[in-house]
Image (cartoon, grey):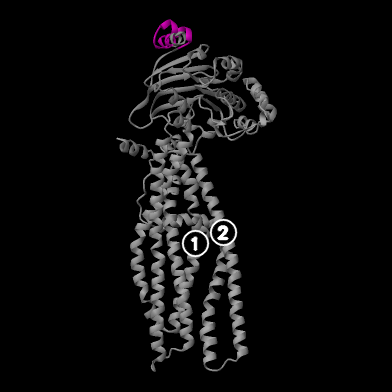
Amino acid sequence: MEQARRKTRFHYSTEEIIEKPFNWKQMTRLFSFLAPYAKSLLPKTIFVMLLATAVRLIIPIFIGVFAVDRLEKGLATTADMVLYAGIVLGLYLFAYVANLFRIRWTNQLGQHVIFDIRKKLFDHIQHLSHRFYDQRSAGSILVRVINDVNSLQDLFTNGVINLLMDAVMLVGIVVILFSLSPELAVVILIVLPIMFFISTKLRRQIRRAWQTVRLRQSRLNSHLNESIQGIRVTQAYAQEHENMDFFDEVNSQNYESWRQATRMNALFRPFVEMASALGGAILIWYGAFLIQSDASTLELGVFVSFAFYIGMFWEPISRLGQVYNQLLVGMASSERIFEFLDEKPNVEDKPDAQPLTDIKGEIVFKEVEFSYDGKRRALNGVDLTFHAGTTVALVGHTGSGKSTIVNLMSRFYDPTSGEIHLDGVDLKDIRLADLRKHVSYVLQDTFIFAGTIMDNIRFGNPSATDEEIIAAAQAIGAHSFIEKLEQGYQTEVEEQGNVLSVGERQLLSFARALIADPRILILDEATASIDTETEVKIQNGLKKLLAGRTAIMIAHRLSTIRDADNIIVLEHGNVIEQGTHDQLMEKKGTYFGLVKSQYAAIKD
């Protein structure tokens, strides 16, 4: 029973391993982020890389074919050998300096690309619709923006340039080996096909292993985010041990996925070292045979150069294995990043969407139907009119459709069928940014950002002056408690504003809405968290906030909506009653029953 319950909880993440073959088309898309630097950092990085590689390829020929051969034939004096040694040292120093610049510029290039990818991903998810966030936990989104982007860092700071450098190095070595002694080169490089065959067998397993790592990290982060956000509930129900047990399970699976992935990676390097040892043994055996053979023209200098090149040959082979692993990690991460980047908003502007400058604020619902999941309807052919400048209250039991109506007003979702008009214009024909500029929300669960109280109020209108912010706070009744804080409006509050009471946070949300000066104001259970005494204090402020605006109030505390111009009673997505408080009380219908029930509860 316990295992079944935990298994169910473990599947809160909707993410799964993406089963796609490794393809260069996607990697080309990833490498397209290098394009902005194709005329600045990339050319000079490639230039110094090619310069350093060319110098390294020259050194073995100079040592073997030039210095050793001349020494063996008695053509070089001691002074000549000292000169040769100085030249070799100079070449190594030159390559070292070139590599310093290569490393410096590749790191700059990599950091620029990582910055660009993370910025593009964050900018993109900022514009995705609410449905996207409904289907994913905050932790899984954080993993994409932080962990998956970080996973590409090695690929762009080292992998891309190293891939090119090692490819040039290998091609250069093979060409030189065959030009020096084709016969010896063929015998030594016979191990390459074997290496290629075995390494291809590992590719699918390594790729899947890194995909699993990304999935396990996502679930771990999701659980951490959930645990931190819900710590009060956890402690209130004394579920700390259960939470720790579940974390141990998620953490163990994350550990095991990393262990498997690193084990798969670890298989490649020893294999390359074995191939290197085998190549060296073949060189000594067959090279010595050729030198001693009367029919062979292999000279000692060429043999020495071969020894250098064979030592150099397996180094890029080993690094290419590491680069390939980086490509696999990049593939796993890029799949997840591009999955988000390819996500299209369910709600977006039409190409010919109209700008919205000034509005009256009349909203009309015409036969509006809506479903969140495509199965159960939240609204059933609703016809409603919210007249400009009036206050309308939405009343009904949980799940009756109140929040759905206000979500549709701001186009967080689009109706499944029917139309919603603002001042006679279909919302779908209005630019989203303009529409939402004229709509402000005051929610029951007020979100407070980390920063000062001044900053939190200014969030409603970034261009507002300090004086305007103070005036808004005074109008809404928040100024008195803010002044009592040690640093007043400059008081720092952490995320969610834990240093403030629930009522104080709600007052800040009212001030934030007022400073935005919207034409349409939505109050979603906005006074539910405010005590009766505080509620009385802000009634005058609310009157100022609502004056001249179209206001839609969702309220369970019916005493707060007695003065509404129109009260709409909803039930299971249908409008069953509407009218003023007095009119609905006279009908003695559903609204009358709700009011009587609340008064009876208060009396008891």
Q: Which residues are magenta?
A: 579-597
Within 10 Å of disc 2 (Cα), the crowding (few <14, some 14-19, many 20+) is: some
Q: Do residues under tags 1 and 2 come within 8 Å of each other at their CB atoms?
A: no
Instruction: Give the residue furthest to the right.
Output: 467
Foreground residue among 394 and 1:
1
The amino acid type found where label 1 is placed reads Val
Within 10 Å of disc 1 (Cα), the crowding (few <14, some 14-19, many 20+) is: some
Main SS of the magenta part reads: helix
Q: Quadrant of residue 536?
A: top right
Instruction: Give the residue furthest to the top.
Output: 586
Let me know if residue 603 is in the magenta part. no
Q: Quadrant of the N terminus?
A: top left
Query: Vertical placement of 482 versus 17: above or below?
Result: above
The residue sitting at 30% across, 37% down in the picture is 4
CA gap, disc 1 and disc 2: 11 Å
The amino acid type found where label 2 is placed reads Asn
Q: Which residue is mark 2?
A: 107
Pinpoint residue 455: horizontal percent, then vertical percent.
63, 33
Circle nearer the N terminus (1, 2)? 2
Q: Quadrant of residue 10?
A: top left
The residue sitting at 50% across, 65% down in the picture is 162
Pinpoint residue 242: horizontal percent, then vertical percent.
39, 36
Pinpoint residue 476: horizontal percent, then vertical percent.
62, 20
